[in-house]
Image (cartoon, coloured by chain):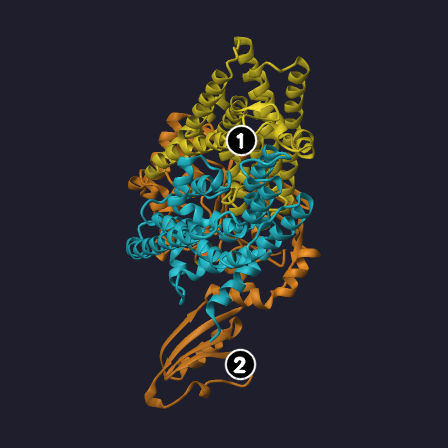
Chain colours: A orange, B yellow, C cyan
Amino acid sequence: MTETIIAVKELSKNYRVPVRSEGLMSSLKSLVHPSYSQVKAVEDLNFEIGVGEMVGLIGPNGAGKTTTLKMLSGLLYPTAGEVRVAGYVPWERRPEYLRKISIVLGNKSQMLWDIPSMDSFRVLSEIYMVPEQEFRRTLDDLIDLLDMKDLLTKPVRNLSLGERMKCELTASLLYRPALLFLDEPTLGLDVSMQLRLRQFLKEYNRRNEVTVILTSHYMADVQALCPRVILIHYGKLLYDGALDGLARRLAPFKLIKITLDQKNGKTFQNFNQPDDKVELLEHEENRYVLRVEREQVPSLTARLLQSNSVTDLSIEDPPIEAVMDQIYTGGAA
Amino acid sequence: MRFFRLISQFIKVSFEEESAYRVNFAISLLTSLLTVGSAALSISVVFGQVDHVQGWTYASTLVVLGVYLIMNALRSLFINPGLESLAGMDGEVWTGKFDFSLLRPVDTQFMVTFRKWRLFSLIDLFFGVLVTGIAIYRMEASVSIGQILLFCLMICSGLAILYAILLFFSSLVFWSPAVMFTWVFNGILQLARYPLSMYPGWLRFILTWIVPVGIITTFPAQALTGELTVKVVILGIGLAVSLVILASCLFRRALRHYSSASS
Amino acid sequence: MKNPGWALMRGFWLSWLQYRSFLFILAFGWMIPPLIYMLVWMMVAGSQGIAGFSQGEFVAYYLVLILVNQITYAQTNWTVGDMIRVGEMNRILMRPIAPVYDPLASEIACKIIYLFFDVPLVIVLALILKPQFHIDFTEAALFIPALLAAWALRFLWGYWLALLAFWATKADALLVLQDTLVFLLGGQVAPVLLLPDWMGRLATALPFRYMVAFPVEILTGQVTGTAVLHGFLIQAGWLALAYILTMILWKNGVRRYGAVGG
């Protein structure tokens, strides 16, 4: 049983948000009389995270993921509830606590723009009081892992988005924090760079037991990196556990893809029985994609195979994006 | 001592950022020369038509200008760049990067004050001292070491007052991100180029008691012209200390506001 | 098809309107130098006046100067330079309308808002300080063309300077240079007539006077007769040069664009 490093109890956050609508008249109105509304960003969250875990915070836009992340890192005061990270109260922002955490914001850079990244690293090492030898060693490790040797001397503004992200990660890990908060880290990166970053994070987590909290819109990130996800929707915690468990619980379907033998002239409709809970998703000539409830899969598959008309059959889990989309738009049970 | 190490890192990095732009170098020098030149020229244009205004001659007005230039140079050396990086047009509060700074294990006010340096302002500082020196010479007044020390003391307290006012305005940015209070203040500060008595009475009052920019240039100038009294020195230092404390409190309040409202 | 320029302007206006205080403060900042010198010259003139100018005439001159300076001030050039440096130019170049519409649209939209702030203030100041005008109406009619030409000149002049950002990424120091020269030779420190000889001659030859002071001088009757004609000629000459420079730099700059953050 790993030691708990993050403990969240009944965490809530409300905001006062200015209300503005479009058009010239309302702009003029808001000049004189701005109006606000109360928004419950996060409501009554409870969870615990152990040392070295990699956890994904998922949920649709505006669900409260970033708000939660900000409260965990110490950027935001909650309206109610308790948080302990590494034994500290995050929003007190004690220097000892701040030296233990690191944050990477996907679309914002913490690097100094006009000079080589190496210079930014030096300043950071001074700010975080990293001894010279340790700094050298850690930097060499990271340069190796991220393949960054040529990037150190180029001004950051001349780097591509992917190269800049490598610098961001280096900067954030220079002082070997115990916790890494990542807010949309792969935003805007190309596919191969996303893959490399995921590999890096996984490897780094394995070697250094860094606890990683990640928010991402790319389900591929979450799938690849986070054995555990916390689903936040409308500010509430809806699910806390493994990702495929979520899919299984909220979308108990499987996809059956079949190719029928054209010689027989049979179509799928021949096999469908009235009380089957089967939905035809796609149909192209003699290829069909069916969505079938889990319990039905064995019997339907058996029926199909016995018919001698099926030349190809595969059974798959529905893509995680589709599941999440259903949850986000439909709300989960 | 860690603070000194940090500051020297900040200076080093700022210097590198500044040197990253080669064209900027020469143009900055030109701009400095222009600023001083045009300021002195402006005064000579005014005094080209008269010999004295309200008891101030060309030379004594030049002293005030010299002090103004020195103040401005010191302010542009580190206070301005730092606060601009926080609250200015491209500042962290505007771009959302302030979160990074808030999570650094260094006092935020310290960082925001000392982390950006514009070493070029040392050239402006030189010109300011030069102008002040020339003005004193033209006034044919003799200046003792004691007066010079007092002058430096008044410069420091004036700078502290200036810092407090700027910090105050920068803090306001947390409540209303799109407003550039410092720009307003810069405009008002321009008034301090000229001796206060050149302005009508109501303005003189405002510049002494409401937005004390007059004090920032007048007191150090008076140290050199020999009109400074002990009472004024104590007033200057007292004002400096209390304003800095007040502004720092507001800044911390602003951070608390940011941490409860950012979305 | 609606005029795309208007759509842009409206878009700018709506978003800028929400940052109204930002713009008011900018306008306030630009007013201060003329106000300072107005006060100083008023003090210098006293009750007897100086060099043929009475207190009231200084007030008149500077109040008009404030408005003219506002109307001709080319602030968008700061943003053009920044657009190039930060790499936003791509977005602008991708639009189906000429790139100059962008700074033009924001220019016009903003000026309207600035004037909302300036005009009432100037009126209040006029009521308090009582300016003295000597206007010859026929000559004063030339104020409008002089003003328009002054705006065009200042806009284009700043534009080509800002385009230098295609080559040297931080060129806004040059714009500071321009502001200084406008300040000294454009009639802000003192009416051009009161400048020492050598400065006065420089002011007449260089473009800066024609960006601000010239229209003011026409309206307040400081220049009359052939001097007005000479002024227009010199103004037109500088305007042509500014236009040519802008075109050349634009063509070459867009070609070169791409190395920085694009």
Q: Position of residue A67 (x, y in %)?
A: 59, 50
Relative to B142, residue A46 above or below:
below
Q: Is residue B81 left or right of residue A23?
A: left
The residue drawn where x is 38% and y is 58% is C90
Measured from the top left, where is residue A205 in percent x and y?
A: 43, 43
* Nearer to me, C2 or A182: C2
The numbered mark 1 sits on a residue in which chain? B
Residue A301 lies, with reference to residue B216, above or below; the image says below
Q: Which label sits on residue A9?
A: none
Residue A332: x and y in percent read 60, 64
Which residue carries the number 2 mark? A276
| Left or right, C172 with reference to B68 | left
Q: Which mark is residue B113?
A: 1
Looking at this rendering, what residue extends furthest in the front direction? C225
Q: Are marks 2 and 1 on the same chain?
A: no
* Residue type at numbered disc 1: Thr
Lateral position of residue C20 relative to residue B117, left or right: right
Along the viewing direction, whichever of C27 and C99 lies nearer the viewer: C27
Marks 2 and 1 sit apart, C-alpha to C-alpha, by 71 Å
Q: Residues within 10 Å of mark 1 (few under 14, many from 20)?
A: many
Residue A34 image-quadrant placement: bottom right
Q: Is residue C225 above or below residue A312?
A: above
Secondary structure of residue under mark 1 = helix
**Disc 2 crowd, CA 10 A, few/some/many (<14, 14-19, 20+):** few
Q: Is residue A72 left or right of residue A147?
A: right
Q: Position of residue A295 (x, y in %)?
A: 53, 72
Q: Which circle, 2 or 1, is nearer the viewer?
A: 1
Observer-nearest of C60 and C25: C60
